Amino acid sequence: MEIMGAKGPAREPDSRLALARTIGEIQLLDARLVCGRDHLVAAAEHAERAMREGTNVAKTLAVEFVLYAAGERQISDAIRKVGVRDDTEEFALVNFDGGNPDEVLRALEMSRDDRVIEPSRQKLQAFGITEAELRSVPPDQVSDLVLERVALVDLLK
């Protein structure tokens, strides 16, 4: 599995995702709601376990991953929250096949920039983390609040 941040021109989401699917088992998220590499790793691990244990909601690993990455139990809510939009120019890209990242980026007309998936207070708030929650943990642990939301998806199913 390869996780990376990337930048690219805004395009119609369905055609971009369809192109990604022709390359391999790839999922794209809007990086504006991705709160670090650990966020994506945790979501991928939970999704892989759900698929392996038969507790999955989605038919594919890539879509199951979106549920966990969004911290939502409904696919439509998850896509609305973290999915690629018409104006998305910063992406989180997860390649579950582990293919050549340079080829994937080239095919999608993107350039790698892992800075776009770094966590920030603004992203945490956009994700739905409240000010009270942010104050409840030490500043160096605020990103863990997203990991908690990822883990809670198992309880919501």
Image (cartoon, rainbow, N blue to C red):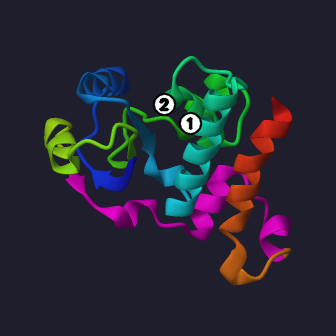
Task: Kindly identify which residue carries mark 1.
Answer: 65
Q: Which residues are magenta?
A: 111-135
The answer for how far apart the CA atoms under marks 2 and 1 are is 5 Å
Pointer 2 with pointer 1, Cβ within 8 A: yes
Relative to 156, 65 lies left or right: left
Q: Is residue 122 one of those drawn in magenta?
A: yes
Coordinates of residue 10 in the picture (x, y in percent): 28, 39
Q: Amino acid at mark 1?
A: Phe
Is disc 2 surrounded by few (<14), some (14 to 19) or many (20+) residues within 10 Å? many
Q: Amino acid at mark 2?
A: Ala
Relative to 156, 71 lies left or right: left
Task: Kindly identify which residue carries mark 2.
Answer: 62
Relative vertical location of residue 155 with respect to residue 5 in this rendering, above or below: above
Secondary structure, mark 2, is helix
Predominant SS along the magenta part: helix
Relative vertical location of residue 60 with respect to residue 81 in this rendering, above or below: above
